[in-house]
Image (cartoon, rainbow, N blue to C red):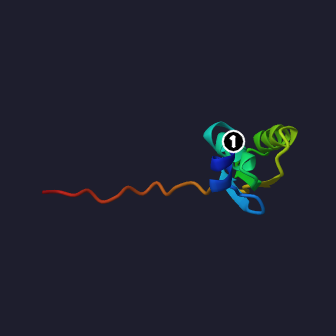
């Protein structure tokens, strides 16, 4: 990134939260934000993917934190059906 663009998009001293930051597009966005100087917080569902992504970002010199999502056990949906609409 040239210096003019770096100045336009300087995120030094800022913190950025990236959901889905463990892989794919989320990881690419986290990498870009870190490259612009942001402290990056990545979160997602897979702790293993997040840890691997954080290791990769740290190797590139990024400041990164992991905030894994914790989902409660889903309850089964009711077997009741929606009323039918007749015309």
In the displayed image of the protein, which residue is found farthest to the left? 87
At 74% from the left and 44% from the top, the residue drawn is 46
Question: Picture coordinates of residue 25 (x, y %)?
Answer: 61, 40
Question: Picture coordinates of residue 69 (x, y %)?
Answer: 72, 55
Is 16 or 73 nearer to us in this picture? 16
Mark 1 = which residue? 27
Q: Is residue 76 visible?
A: yes
Question: The C terminus lies in which quarter of the figure?
Answer: bottom left
Q: Quadrant of residue 67?
A: bottom right
In the displayed image of the protein, which residue is found farthest to the front? 4
Decide if residue 80 is on the left or right side of residue 4.
Answer: left
As drawn, 16 above or below 36: below
- Element type at marker 1? helix
Q: Is residue 73 visible?
A: no
As drawn, 60 above or below 10: above
Question: Picture coordinates of residue 59 (x, y %)?
Answer: 87, 38
Is 21 or 29 nearer to us in this picture? 29
Question: The N terminus lies in which quarter of the figure?
Answer: top right
At 71% from the left and 50% from the top, the residue drawn is 36
Question: Picture coordinates of residue 10 (x, y %)?
Answer: 69, 56
At 76% from the left and 58% from the top, the residue drawn is 12
């Amino acid at each position: 990134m040239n210096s003019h663009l770096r100045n336009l998009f300087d995120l030094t001293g800022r913190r950025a939260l990236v959901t889905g930051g463990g892989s794919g597009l989320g990881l690419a966005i986290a990498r870009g934000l870190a490259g612009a100087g942001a402290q990056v917080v990545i979160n997602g569902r897979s702790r293993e993917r997040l840890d691997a992504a954080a290791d990769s970002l740290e190797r590139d010199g990024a400041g990164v934190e992991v905030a894994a999502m914790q989902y409660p056990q889903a309850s089964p949906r009711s077997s009741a059906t929606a009323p039918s609409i007749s015309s």
